[in-house]
Each structure stands twice: as C-alpha cells, then as structure tokens.
Image (tube, helix red, strand yellow):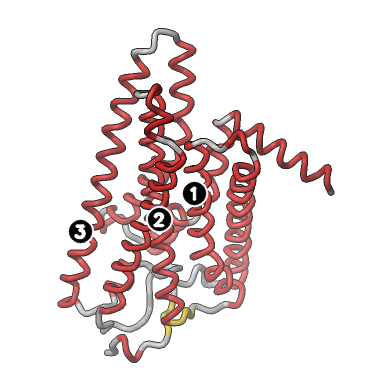
Amino acid sequence: MSNSSSISHFLLLALADTRQLQLLHFCLFLGISLAALLGNGLIISTIACGHHLHTPMFFFLLNLALSDLGSICTTVPKAMHNSLWDTRNISYIGCTAQLFFFMFFISAEYFLLTIMCYDRYVSICKPLHYGTLLGSRACAHMAAAAWASAFLNALLLTGNTFSLPLCHGNALGQFFCEIPQILKISCSKSHLREFGLIVLSVCFGLGCFMFIVFSYVQIFRAVLRIPSEQGRHKAFSTCLPHLAVLSLFISTGMFTHLKPPSMSSSSLDLALSVLYSVVPPALNPLIYSLRNQELKAAVKRQITGWFRKH
C-alpha cells in the first residue's frame, strides 16, 4: 500500500514483450507522428501564408491543426522513448503534465469542432448574415473561448485527479497517462469528487454534441431545399470533411471508454487507445485536404514553391 506522496514515478503499459515488437511499435509510432507533423504543419503554414485562405472556415481549421499537433506530441514521444529504450517509467511530474496537456488539446479539439459546425450552419442556413455573425473579431473570440474552456477543463480534471490519494501501486494500464487509469489506482472512497467533475464535463460535452446534431439537422433540411442537384452537392461537399473528422473523433473516443467490460482485453484496449489518441491527428489533415479543393490546390502550391526555392 502506498499513497501519492510516496510515488515518484508511474509504470506505463508495455507495448510489447519482445525486443522486435518494441522496435516495430517504435517505427509505427514514428511513421504516424511524422505523418501528423507533416500534414498538420502543411495545413498551418499554407493557411497562414495564403491570404485568400483567411476565412472563418480555414481559421478554425488552422486552430484544429494546432490542437492535433499538440495532442500527438503529448503522448507519442514518451511511448516511442519507452519502446526504444525498453522502459516503462514516467515521472510523477511528467505524468501530471502529460495528462493535463492531453486533456487540454483533446478538449480544445472537441470545442473547435463544435464551433466549426456553427460555421457550416451559418454558411448554409444563413448565408446573408455570414459576414456579420462570423466576422474576424467574432471568430477570434470563439477560438479564444474554445482554448480557454479547454484549459480550464484540463486544469480542473488534472488537479482533482492528482489530489486523490493513490493506494494501489503505480502501474497504469495504458501507454500514456489518462484519468481512468489514475482512478483505478486511487482509493475507491475518494472517487466522489472526481466523479462529479467528470459528470460535469460529460454533461458539457453532451451539450456540445446536441448542438452539433441540431445544427446538422438544420443544415440537411436547408440543403434538401436547394433546387439544383449541383447546388446540393456543393453544399454537402463543404460539410463532408467536418462530418468525417467529427465522426472519427467521437466514435473512437466513445467506443474506447463506453465499451462493455466483457469486450476488454489488453490488446484490444491498446489498439482502441491508439485509434482514438494517435490516429485522428494523422488522418485529419488528409481528410480535409482530399475533400477541399481550395485547400488541396493551396497545399500543392506551397510544396511546389518550397521545392523551387531549394
């Protein structure tokens, strides 16, 4: 039996038992992280340098790319380090920081996706008021509110999680620090405060989800009223990337944390955790660049211009 004051480090989940598999996991994480860094980096630089892309939709996409970069840089480097050097250790401070930043960037991504849904709603359902409702100042305020809310959410959850006494060792069943794993090694009688805060966060998340559902119901109704098939296709195509990214983000996270206990196994849990924490940041740039012709053309010009300079 131990408590949090005597714990100097945690033991993360070992990704593999053999050295060959550890190196394979290292290479896999390296490839995914490089893809995420390249894709999100290209989107950020392209939108920042392309003045014709300084619109609300691309402004929020730039913020989304920043949250994706932060998310993958929070979890993957430590997992790569542990696989390469055959270790499981992460310091107490390192675990605290990892949990905080992971919650911060994941929360920011969800809030930004909600705002991007509002952007699509105004664009399709209230096009005449688009410039008024989504001016540069309004967009800056919404983005700032998303980041500030994410910071507050991460601060409260992290502070409450690590204020609990830890009575059941220091081994975590995950390759990075997350709240459910910390709760498993804490004293059961101390869960009430943390549970209440998680319920509050879930309710807030459900509120955003209901807003997204309501907005898309209105969007689909407006699109179906467009007389021309070409107009309907164009309107739908502007929503598809956002819907794809949103579905990937919500479905993987919900299935990972809400699946029945009978489906739990170490290999399945590991695969699902990678699916919801590592894969989306790498796939999001691909989804947006493939479906958005304007962004695709801008990225091509950015790459071509870079090669010409070098």
Residue 264 in picture, x, y percent from top left: 32, 59
Q: Quadrant of residue 132?
A: top left
User: What crowding class fits label 3: few (fewer than 14 Cα within 10 Å), some (14-19), or many (20 or more)?
Assistant: few
Q: What residue does disc 3 label?
A: 199
Is 123 rendered above or below residue 202?
A: above
Amino acid under label 1? Answer: Asn
Q: In percent of the image, x 31 and y 37: which residue is there? A: 212
Q: Are marks 1 and 3 in contact (CB under 8 Å)?
A: no
Q: Nearer the viewer, mark 1 or mark 3?
A: 1
In the drawing, does residue 171 fall left or right of residue 279?
Answer: left
Q: Between 169 and 161, which is closer to the camera in this rendering?
A: 161
Q: Secondary structure at mark 3?
A: helix
Q: Quadrant of residue 139?
A: top left
Residue 8 in picture, x, y percent from top left: 41, 88
Q: In percent of the image, x 34 and y 25: which residue is there? A: 219
Q: Between 187 and 197, which is closer to the camera in this rendering?
A: 197
Amino acid under label 2? Answer: Trp
Q: Are marks 1 and 2 in contact (CB under 8 Å)?
A: yes
Quarter of the figure that contains the N terminus? bottom left
Q: In percent of the image, x 34 and y 68: which residue is there? A: 155
Q: What residue does disc 2 label?
A: 147
Q: In percent of the image, x 37 and y 49: which residue is there? A: 110
Q: Mark 1 vs mark 2: which is more N-terminal? A: 1
Q: What residue does disc 1 label?
A: 63
Is 249 rendered above or below residue 264?
A: above
